[in-house]
Image (cartoon, grey):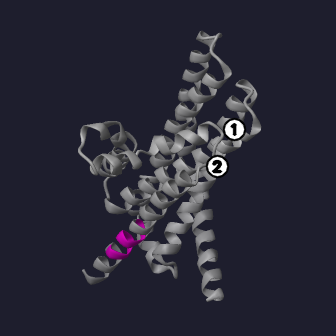
Amino acid sequence: MRRGAFRALTNARWIFLKELSSFLGSNLPIGAVAIVALFCGAISVVIGANPGIGKANIVMVLFRVFYIILLVVPASLAMFSFVSERRQGTMELLYTLPVTDFEMVLGKFFMGLLSIAVISVGITFFYVVWIADASLFVALAGVFGLMLAGTYAYCVGLFASSLTDSYLLGFLVTTLVLFIVDVGGFFAGLLPSPAREVLTHMHAYSQFFPFARGIIPLKGVVFFSSLAALFLFLTVKVLESRRWRGSES
């Protein structure tokens, strides 16, 4: 069992390094930086136009915007993952290697974690700690919450990418899932019980909000971790199904 786990991590590491090399050699870093710069530029304009805004309010505004960034960028990076592999013909090459679908997904997941960590730590410590002068504990709790939210969004993008060979469909599936989970809670009051309670609990931003206040709630950790694990599991199952159908055809 230990040997199997070591083999899985070794193969996942190989996939991770392959993903990192492909990522650095593509236009994706430029696109990611452009999106982050666009949002951060908007933040700077808002803060500069409101010099009397309180520190606590600045921190909340920052984390609201960062939350959107950590949904948009990781999901955008992930939802092209398997689609690009199929269009470039590298998916068939991966199928010929002694790499399982779980190891393939795990390696891509590690790549997602790296990009999420870089974005979360970079923008939080620059804006929240340096500019807003927030406490280190608030910044650390916020970074942790952003990483959880970004990881969930990345896993949704991976799942959408595993379903289709179309960039457009991958984008639509990702957007639909994120919209339901992140915006659906705002409409919970329109529904009867118990649907109201379920939709309220599934409101992702409500789960993230305590992190922005310097609190690390167990419910929020479980919520985002469970969603990430669910979509990783579904991604593996979709890949296994596609591989099996391909071998049968």
Task: Name the residue at 65% across, 81% down.
Answer: 6
Part of the protein shown in magenta: 235-241
Front label number (2 vs 1): 1
* Label 1 crowd (10 A; few <14 / some 14-19 / many >=20): some
Relative to 198, say whether 189 is above or below: above
Q: Find residue 158 and report its horizontal and vertical position in percent.
A: 43, 58
Identify the residue position indicated by label 2 in the image: 117
- The Cα atoms of the two marked residues, 2 and 1, are separated by 17 Å
**Any magenta on residue 105?**
no
The residue sitting at 75% across, 34% down in the picture is 135
Question: In the image, is residue 154 above or below residue 249?
Answer: above
Q: Is residue 47 left or right of residue 77?
A: right
Q: Position of residue 184 (x, y in %)?
A: 33, 42
Q: Nearer the viewer, residue 37 or 174?
A: 174
Type of amino acid under label 1: Val
- Seen as rendered, the residue at the extreme front is 193
Q: Dot 1 corresponds to which residue?
A: 138
Q: Measuring from the top left, give residue 238's x and y in whole percent.
A: 35, 69
Q: Is residue 38 visible?
A: yes
**Is residue 27 in view from this perspective?**
no
The reply, left or right, for residue 213 in relation to residue 133 is left
Above or below — where is 43 with respect to 104?
above
Depth check: 223 or 238 in front? 223
Mark 2: secondary structure: helix
How dense is the environment of label 2, judged by Cα within 10 Å: few (below 14), some, or many (20 and up)?
some
Q: Position of residue 175 (x, y in %)?
A: 35, 45
- Position of the N terminus, as image quadrant, is bottom right
Majority secondary structure of the magenta segment?
helix
Whichever of labels 2 and 1 marks the residue nearer the N terminus, that label is 2
User: Which mark, by number, is residue 27?
Assistant: none
Dot 2 amino acid type = Ala
Task: Specify the quadrant that holds the C terminus.
Answer: bottom left
